């Protein structure tokens, strides 16, 4: 029996123009032509489903803001009908009455989810076009991308943004900027190509300088500094979970009264410490910053550096620091119980929102 996934696989980029023309015939001036591909692929992906909760959250962040910003909510039924009509034409060999009924039900669920997301979305743009200015590969499976938005991205350190490449339109993935806002507007993104990660694989292995990407609205990932507190910080990073924590270090560097910061960076071996040069420059520039490497599987490491990041971080816990942890899923799953058992108060532990019990997606997955 044909499925929505199989039908969507027959839909190519040309269908976005067909969708826009269909929508323009039914409701002229509703959607700018330049946004047709982004909108069509995102909504279609939501209707087809199958994404994990983090990717679905990224999609809804983008679509909710788009419906709100462009004033599309009163026309949701018209938009949905244009989408299904377009898919039916492009997937004609598979489009049976049974599949049409399935698609209508999926569209109703997607529209309901978008309405809820739009109600929770803030005001402003739904996406930003950015150009890749630099693409560095410090290790075979990690890339550091420096991108410049055509219009300044209004983000804060510790936030996460949905990211999409035209090589895979409709697929959005959370990433956290590795820097505080810069005068030139550039944003640094750290990406690890994870098994089965279609977007991360493209960003690491295929994207090149000069290409365009899309960024969605910045969202709270549970890692922002509390402006009402000025306690010292203990930051614990694993893998590309370093990115949002490095952004927090840059934020502290811009504050007038600088607290002391200890950043523990976990890696398997020294060669896996992918951002070593930037970290060394940061530490040399600031006497209030201490960077501690933690090597879980490097026989050449100094005794004080041997162990997983959480074990070594607890040696530096003073009893008064705010503790931020960001890294791969096993590390995050283990973090809260280990920190609580070591005497860290629950209100001093900050984890990416997905692992803290919230609805958002972790920026490092």
Image (cartoon, rainbow, N blue to C red):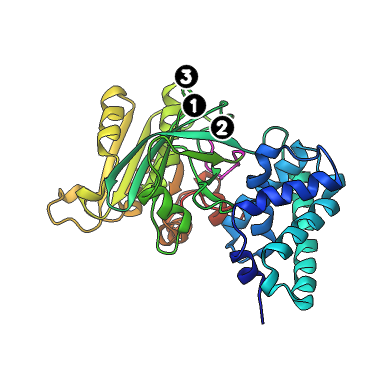
- Depth check: give the residue in front, 249 or 204: 204
Seen at 28% across and 29% down, the residue is: 283
Seen at 29% across and 44% down, the residue is: 137
The answer to whether residue 304 is seen in the rendering is yes
Residue segment shown in magenta: 217-225
Contact flag, marks 1 and 2 (Cβ < 8 Å): yes
The answer to whether residue 327 is seen in the rendering is no
Q: Main secondary structure of the magenta part?
A: loop
The 10 Å Cα crowd at callout 3, few under 14, some 14 to 19, many 20 or more, is few
Is residue 222 part of the magenta span, yes or no?
yes
Residue 102's place in the image compared with 184, above or below, is below
> On the image, numbered disc 1 is attached to which residue?
181
- In which quadrant of the rendered image does the N terminus lie? bottom right
> On the image, numbered disc 2 is attached to which residue?
155
Residue 224 x %, y %: 54, 37
- Depth check: give the residue in front, 203 or 358: 203
> On the image, numbered disc 3 is attached to which residue?
183
Is residue 67 part of the magenta span, yes or no?
no
Residue 291 x %, y %: 29, 37
């Amino acid at each position: 029996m044909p499925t929505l996934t199989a039908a969507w696989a027959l839909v190519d980029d040309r269908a976005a123009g067909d969708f826009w023309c269909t929508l323009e015939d039914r409701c002229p001036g509703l959607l700018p032509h330049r946004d047709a591909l982004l909108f069509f692929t995102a909504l279609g992906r939501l209707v087809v489903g199958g994404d994990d909760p983090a990717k679905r959250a990224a999609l809804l962040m983008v679509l909710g803001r788009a419906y709100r910003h462009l004033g599309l909510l009163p026309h949701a039924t018209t938009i949905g009908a244009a989408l299904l009509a377009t898919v039916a034409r492009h997937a004609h060999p598979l489009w049976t009455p049974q599949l049409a009924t399935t698609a209508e039900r999926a569209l109703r669920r997607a529209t309901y989810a978008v309405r809820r997301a739009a109600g929770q979305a803030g005001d402003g743009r739904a996406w930003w076009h950015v150009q890749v200015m630099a693409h560095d590969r410090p290790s075979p499976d990690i890339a550091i991308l420096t991108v410049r938005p055509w219009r300044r991205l209004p983000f804060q350190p510790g936030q996460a943004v949905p990211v999409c490449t035209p090589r895979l339109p409709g697929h959005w993935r959370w990433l956290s900027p590795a820097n505080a806002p810069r005068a030139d507007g550039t944003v640094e993104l750290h990406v690890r190509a994870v098994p089965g990660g279609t977007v991360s694989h493209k960003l690491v292995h295929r994207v090149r300088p000069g290409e365009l990407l899309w960024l969605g609205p910045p969202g709270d990932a549970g890692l922002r500094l509390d402006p009402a507190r000025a306690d010292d910080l203990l930051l614990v990073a694993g893998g590309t979970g370093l990115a949002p924590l490095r952004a927090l270090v840059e934020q502290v560097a811009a504050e007038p009264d600088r607290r002391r910061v200890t950043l523990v960076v976990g890696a398997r071996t020294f060669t896996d410490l992918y951002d070593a040069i930037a970290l060394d420059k940061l530490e040399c520039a600031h006497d209030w910053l201490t960077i501690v490497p933690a090597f879980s599987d490097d026989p050449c490491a100094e005794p004080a550096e041997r162990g997983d990041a959480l074990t070594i971080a607890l040696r530096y816990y003073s009893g008064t620091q705010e503790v931020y942890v960001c890294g791969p899923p096993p590390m995050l799953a283990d973090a809260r119980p280990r920190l609580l058992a070591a005497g860290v108060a629950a209100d001093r532990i900050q984890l990416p929102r997905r692992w803290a019990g919230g609805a958002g997606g972790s920026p490092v997955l």
